[in-house]
Image (spheres, rainbow, N blue to C red):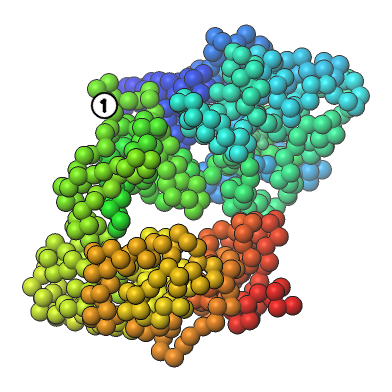
């Protein structure tokens, strides 16, 4: 009995949380929970109700279409109820749904059973709309509301150009079309930029901005917001034709001039359906609108009718939700990190959260202006986004959950590493620690020098460097080459073997080619490509000490900004000292060679590559190095500037489709080897 009491209380609590979240999402267009956390509450309530069926009352959120009505709009009763969809989060759960469907259908005769096939559609992340046409004229548009009654948003919907106001072909007494109003990603970005310029709050994501833009009192505001529409369901039709399948209704809608999503496909096999869902998930970032899953629907309309619906969702359709790319989590603190140039970058420490396929616990906040603009404060709940390969981003705070005693965050006045002042110069967005000998900067500079892109000293990561610096064994890269095994043995966590190994690795790096030393010096604007070019002219580090602007300007493709930066670096007494001390210990005399005896022609100069999949004769890194050593450039994703996509085994589907769409030349490993040797095939002939 006590169990039941506890369950009852927990159910009441869950219902309250769900209803509050519904109001924030549907009425205020400003969610307080991520979709993921919301779905978890619903799943928890469902489980509780299935253990204690007495708790499953008709007004439980598990039995209703989620949504509330705002007083801003006139309520309209829907011609027929607008339902929600049940969700699944894994292929196992999808299999259970297939089983339930087949069990339902197995009670029918075999002729009917043969009709079982499915339509797979992207699940558009916008807001559901019902459009009613009388005698071919749009007379009413309504939001889903609570499913029975929606909000009258006709005047606003009339401003959306993708939605027909008058139907050309045939006059039907009554036609109801359902679909999703959404904001294209480009329009969302432009809108947020505009909001920022005007000092107005930005929208968290395209779905909120679509809902916020449509649910406006003044249709002029809606008109300025570039909303669009995908239709996915034919509702009531009176005085029109009959249909037997969902696909026919979609074709009909397309003929009438409604936008129908091009990714919608028909499939009868469960394996194939899963592949299509995976494919949609992989392509989701190539679309110019957001999708949060796939919807699988039975195609045959008579089967749908026989399966029917529960009080909130049809049995003939299911939403497969993709893993979340947006979460809401606690921002525990905001701290500042010091980079190798002294740049002070604020970053958020987050309560770890699974988003975009990985656990995120840190996210950059870029600079002071960004923190102010986003108005994020320590102990706020914040929206965290990580889409695909993109680095995690703190989108903004959930103001409804802000602690009452919250204070805006202010940029620290002093460097957290050395205690020196942090300076923000006029017209710059970053603060800098201006003490070149700040221990934080030293650690970053030396870690960069030892990193894989530069001198590639194995075993010398940031932690080790930090240990060496705090024990005052190194302050400049050249100090590394003076280290003795005995120095290391005096430190924690060093034993004979590890000390010897590190000394050998440092010693081994002495033969690295000049371009790597140049990369390691972290001269402003000098990356691998520029370093390779410079090293082809300036043959050694000692020559670099006497280099003049005029020498550098002779190098093809090396701009003035880079040349000036190099000259400044070797003239500044401090940085010059660093170069001189490296020359003293014999670094950077090896010329443009990767290993002894190997040198490369700049066959790929000016060409840009993307590599995807596994190659048989190179690791990814070797392939990329082979390109940069020959003067080419490597980027992570195809763009209009990409010349070649090199494709190995199991390539990324999104890179392939993007390259195809952009007309990028796609080459296999053999063609890649040829290209390395003789450069751009197109140029050669
Ligand atoms: S069909 C009765 N198809 O998802 C079935 N809904 O979670 C009605 N949605 O309220 C919905 N894309 O706002 C359907 N291709 C699609 C959809 C879709 C997005 C939305 C719609 C619905 C919600 C349910």
Q: Is 389 situated left or right of 463 in this image?
A: right
Rate crowding at label 1 as few (under 14), some (14 to 19) or many (20 or more) other CA atoms within 10 Å. Answer: few
| Depth check, front residue: 520 or 73 | 520
Q: Residue furthest bottom?
A: 597
Regarding residue 684, the answer to whether it shows in the image is yes
Regarding residue 350, the answer to whether it shows in the image is no
Q: Name the residue at 90% across, 27% down.
A: 169
Q: Name the residue at 45% across, 42% down.
A: 385
Q: Is 118 situated left or right of 310 in this image?
A: right
Q: Is 378 situated left or right of 396 in this image?
A: left
Quadrant placement of the N terminus: top left
Q: Quadrant of residue 678?
A: bottom right
Assign ligand 1 to one image quadrant: top right
Q: Residue furthest right?
A: 170
Q: Name the residue at 37% across, 66% down.
A: 567
Q: Is residue 570 above or below residue 326?
A: below
Q: Name the residue at 72% across, 40% down.
A: 261
Q: Is residue 360 above or below residue 309?
A: below
Residue 370 in picture, x, y percent from top left:
39, 37
The residue identified by callout 1 is 407
| Depth check, front residue: 520 or 6 | 520
Residue 135 in picture, x, y percent from top left:
86, 16
Q: Is residue 392 above or below residue 544?
A: above
Residue 413 in picture, x, y percent from top left:
21, 39
Q: Is 18 situated left or right of 268 in this image?
A: left
Badge 1 marks a residue whose secondary structure is loop
Q: Quadrant of residue 586?
A: bottom left
Quadrant placement of the C terminus: bottom right
Q: Is residue 282 above or below residue 506?
A: above
- From the Cβ of disc 1, is ligand 1 less than 8 Å away? no
Residue 578 in picture, x, y percent from top left:
25, 69
């Amino acid at each position: 009995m006590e169990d039941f009491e506890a369950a009852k209380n927990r159910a009441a609590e869950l219902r309250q949380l769900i209803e509050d979240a519904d109001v924030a999402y549907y009425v205020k267009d400003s969610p307080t929970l991520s979709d993921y956390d919301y779905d978890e509450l619903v799943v928890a309530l469902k489980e509780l109700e299935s253990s204690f069926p007495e708790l499953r009352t008709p007004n439980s959120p598990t039995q209703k279409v989620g949504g509330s009505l705002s007083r801003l709009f006139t309520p309209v009763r829907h011609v027929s109820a607008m339902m929600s969809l049940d969700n699944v989060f894994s292929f196992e759960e999808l299999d259970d749904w297939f089983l339930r469907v087949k069990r339902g259908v197995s009670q029918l005769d075999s002729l009917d059973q043969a009709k079982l096939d499915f339509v797979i559609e992207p699940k558009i992340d916008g807001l559901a709309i019902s459009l009613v046409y009388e005698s071919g004229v749009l007379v009413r548009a309504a939001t889903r509301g609570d499913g029975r009654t929606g909000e009258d948003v006709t005047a606003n919907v009339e401003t959306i150009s993708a939605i027909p106001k008058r139907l050309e072909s045939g006059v039907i007494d009554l036609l109801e079309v359902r679909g999703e109003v959404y904001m294209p990603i480009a329009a969302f970005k432009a809108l947020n930029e505009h909001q920022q310029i005007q000092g107005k709050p930005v929208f968290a994501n395209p779905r909120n901005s679509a809902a916020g833009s449509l649910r406006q009192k003044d249709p002029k505001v809606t008109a300025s917001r570039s909303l669009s529409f995908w239709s996915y369901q034919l509702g009531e039709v009176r005085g029109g034709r009959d249909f037997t399948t969902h696909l026919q209704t979609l074709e009909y809608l397309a003929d009438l001039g409604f936008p129908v999503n091009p990714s919608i496909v028909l499939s009868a096999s469960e394996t194939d359906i899963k592949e299509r869902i995976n494919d949609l998930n992989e392509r989701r970032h190539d679309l110019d609108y957001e999708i949060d899953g796939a919807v699988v629907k039975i195609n045959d309309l008579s089967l749908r009718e026989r399966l029917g619906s529960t009080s909130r969702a049809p049995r003939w359709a299911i939403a497969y939700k993709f893993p979340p790319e947006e979460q809401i989590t606690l921002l525990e603190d905001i701290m500042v990190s010091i980079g190798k140039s002294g740049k002070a970058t604020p970053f958020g420490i987050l309560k770890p959260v699974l988003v975009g396929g990985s656990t995120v616990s840190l996210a950059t906040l870029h600079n002071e202006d960004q923190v102010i603009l986003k108005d994020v404060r320590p102990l706020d709940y914040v929206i965290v986004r990580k889409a695909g390969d993109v680095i995690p981003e703190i989108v903004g705070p959930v103001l409804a959950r802000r602690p009452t005693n919250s204070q805006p965050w202010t940029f620290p006045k002093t460097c957290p590493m050395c205690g020196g002042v942090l300076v923000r110069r006029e017209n710059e967005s970053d603060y800098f620690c201006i003490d070149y000998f700040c221990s934080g900067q030293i650690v970053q500079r030396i870690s960069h020098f030892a990193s894989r892109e530069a001198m590639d000293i194995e075993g010398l990561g940031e932690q080790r460097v930090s240990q060496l610096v705090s024990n005052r064994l190194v302050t400049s890269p050249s100090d590394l080459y003076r280290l003795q095994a005995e120095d290391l043995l005096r430190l924690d966590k060093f034993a004979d073997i590890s000390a010897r190994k590190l000394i050998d690795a440092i010693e081994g790096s002495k033969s690295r080619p000049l371009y790597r030393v140049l990369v390691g010096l972290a001269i402003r604007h000098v990356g691998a490509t520029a370093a390779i070019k410079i090293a082809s002219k300036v043959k050694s580090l000692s020559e670099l000490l006497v280099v003049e602007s005029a020498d550098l300007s002779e190098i093809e493709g090396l701009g003035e900004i880079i040349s000036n930066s190099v000259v400044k670096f070797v003239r500044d007494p401090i940085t010059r000292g660093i170069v001189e001390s490296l020359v003293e210990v014999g670094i950077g005399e090896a010329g443009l060679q990767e290993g002894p005896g190997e040198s490369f022609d700049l066959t790929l100069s000016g060409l840009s590559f993307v590599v995807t999949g596994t190659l048989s004769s190179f690791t990814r890194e070797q392939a990329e190095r082979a390109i940069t050593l020959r003067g080419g450039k490597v980027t992570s994703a195809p763009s209009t500037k990409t010349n070649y996509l090199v494709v190995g085994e199991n390539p990324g589907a999104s890179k392939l489709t993007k390259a195809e769409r952009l007309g990028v030349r796609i080459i296999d490993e053999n063609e890649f080897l040829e290209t390395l040797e003789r450069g751009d095939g197109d140029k050669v002939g």
